[in-house]
Amino acid sequence: MPGERMRIGVLCSGRGSNLQAILDASRDPAYPAEVAVVISDNPRAYALDRARARAVPAEVIIPASFPDRIQHDLAVAQRLKEYGVGLVALAGYMRIVSPQFIRRFPGRVMNIHPALLPSFPGLHAQKQAVLYGVKVSGVTVHFVDEGVDTGPIILQVPVAVAEEDTEESLSARILEHEHRAYPEAIRLFAEGRIRAEGRRVWIRRS
Ligand code: GRF
């Protein structure tokens, strides 16, 4: 029997295709992590259905129910703690998490971004890449720090940009790579192979 798996909490606001990739990866009993809970700020997020379809607890914590952003974040953090998560994975979570949230999970919050950071941070990264005219964009999985898409980089996957690409076509191609990269980064983390030293991240491959 494989040992105990790392429990992860996934925060989503929408479609949840990266969540689905993580859920699919964790179907393999040899995968070292499992989704303990999915939390959304959006009651209509399709991600919630994806979680429930796998009998994973899916909860909604609505920002408008709290006096401010920090109180909302603290409620989310509290719930994640109650589920005993060892890693928080942001997957299409359309909120910037506060320093107060991050401090509750030091070195244990990851995000996936659809560009090669530090290029094209923030929203609509694929559109930014097409408009800028880069020939290569891609995927970044990184630890979350107090900036927007600025944390230490764990994995990057380059994706060629074709001359005829649109935001939609590039997004679709990048997304396929996201669905491999995020489960892989989580696997490396859960296996204890990732070590961050300041900005630099070291991965033990063997
Ligand atoms: C992905 O492109 C991810 O990189 C970005 O938001 C999108 C979420 O998609 N942060 P999904 O909800 O996982 O399908």
Image (spheres, rainbow, N blue to C red):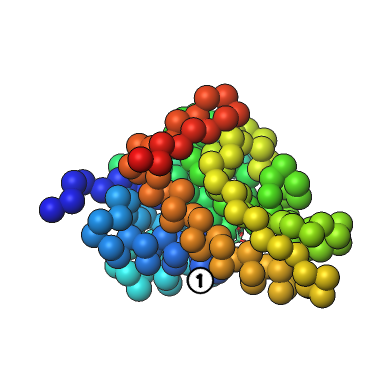
94, 192: nearer the viewer: 192
Q: Quick check: 1 above or below 146? A: below
In this rendering, the answer to whether 129 lies above or below 172 is above
126 is higher (above) or lower (below) than 199: below
Towards the viewer: 99 or 89:
89
For label 1, being within 8 Å of ligand 1 is answered yes
Few, some or many residues within 10 Å of mark 1 (<14, 14–19, 20+): some
Query: Which residue carries the number 1 mark?
Result: 46
**Residue reaching furthest to the right:** 132
Dividing the picture into quadrants, the one containing residue 49 is bottom left
Nearest the viewer among 109 and 203 is: 203
Which quarter is ligand 1 in? bottom right
- Front-lying residue, 7 or 3: 3
Could you tell me if residue 28 is visible in this image? yes
- Image location of residue 66, percent across then percent down: 55, 45
Image spot of residue 132 (x, y percent): 86, 57
Task: Identify whether 172 is placed above or below 179.
Answer: below
Mark 1: secondary structure = helix
Q: Is residue 11 visible?
A: no
| Residue 86 location, quadrant | top left
